[in-house]
Image: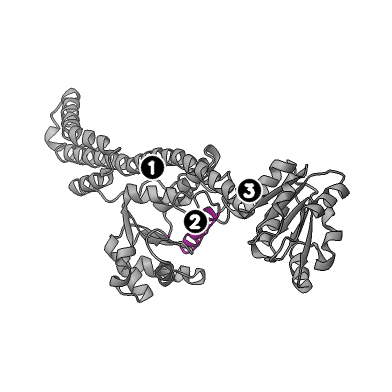
Amino acid sequence: MQLALIGVSHKTAPVEIRERLAFPSEKMRAALEALMERAKAGEAMILSTCNRVEIVAEGPSDELIRQFLYEYHRIGAEAVSDHLYCLQNADAIRHVFRVTSSLDSMMIGEPQILGQVKEAFRIANDAGTIGTNLSALMNRAFAVAKRVRSETGISQSAVSISYAAVELARQIFRDLTGKTVMIIGASKMGELAARHLKRNGVSSVLVTNRTFEKAVEVAKVFDGAAIPFEHFTDHIDRADIVISSTGAPHFVITKPMAERIIKHRKNKPVFFIDIAVPRDIDPAVNEIDNVFLYDIDDLQQVIDANLKERLKEAHRAEEIIDGEVQAFCTRMQSREVVPTIVEMRASVEKQRHEEIERYRKKMKDFTPEQVAIVDQITESLVNKILHNPITQLKGMAHDPRGADFAETARKLFNIKPSSGPSGSEGTTGSTGRSSDDEPPV
């Protein structure tokens, strides 16, 4: 398998370059067909997200893929060539495994990329541009991503404000089932935190905002209830979790108010999440028993600590990928080498039998024992002639250049290219988003 990967990502190109090279999903099939034709690719797929555009192809040279990119997007080489990365064979395989496992993402461990890669694979498969080699590669990539996720903690610790809020809420309440959350001020960040809380078991959402119509609009998203801002203090004791982000110039929730809330709740815990700047909640409320307050800086400290943990886990994930790349390369090289050895022996053996038959009339006076000796001698000669080439090819089964040597051997022995095994490395249960629960980001 001769694999080439050309692309740009958030690490190599600004957004304006990535935008110019992007492939809209509705045009992806046509783009794949054009790629196969212009780049003379045997197999190909295109991954196009907001953070990366990558072409993975079997067969063509880097230059042909580059030319396709330039021509398809009508963009000059000088505008993008410095931003492109070009990877071959084992390096390309490693990159595919790392991308699919979210090790190359802007936020290491984020879950979205796996679904995006699966969707790119599905589109290419439907377009008929996936063959046995890319099928084996991508199915193995999905298995590697699953292994990384299950054997490391790369996606377990929260590294966003909204998920950090969920993580802290779980620490306080253990089980969020049946809890109520109140959103004070309908900010996007507050809404996102509430969305994640509800997905994790919160049953009721109350929304209050200075503009009541906005509160009604957000409440509909959660099948919740809108509370007029001037009356939210009459309902706040119903909330186990309060997310505040009003942007008010003064405290919206004071210590005396929090004392009344905890009294009305009969000392049941309440979790305040203050994501407003300036702050909405008086820091003194943290002095009250069973009242837990985290502001934006507190949440950021949680995120920073979790990021360090993810980076530690990323080292373990890299070790897993190193082993998987080596094992996959060995399997793929064996797929090239082993059939070649079989075909070499079959080809020479066929010639041996044809030569014996050609001289059969001249051996008419040979006794059966003499004919057997001729057969034995010629078989021995074939074995001696093939011994060194076969030994060398077997040794190359674990070498990155194994496929090249196999191709050379086929040419020397006039053997037609082997199609190799038709099976893939396994199947993935889905080509869309991962069916597993999303880990926190």
Question: Residue at (36%, 39%) from the top-left corner?
Answer: 326
Q: Residue at x 47, y 51 (%)?
A: 100
The residue pinned by badge 2 equals 117
The CA distance from mark 3 to mark 1 is 27 Å
Seen as rendered, the residue at the extreme bottom is: 74
How are the colours assigned in the image? one colour
What amino acid is found at the position of numbered circle 2 in the picture?
Val
Q: Which residues are magenta?
A: 112-129
CB within 8 Å, label 2 to label 1: no
Q: Tell me if residue 232 can be seen.
A: yes
Q: Determine if residue 137 is in view.
A: no
Residue type at mark 1? Val
Q: Secondary structure at mark 1?
A: helix
Judge whether 306 appears above or below 213 on screen. above
Q: Which of label 3 and label 1 is nearer to you?
A: 3
Q: Is residue 441 left or right of residue 256?
A: left
For label 2, the SS is helix
Classify mark 1: residues with Cα within 10 Å, few (<14), some (14-19) or many (20+): many
- Element on which disc 3 rests: loop
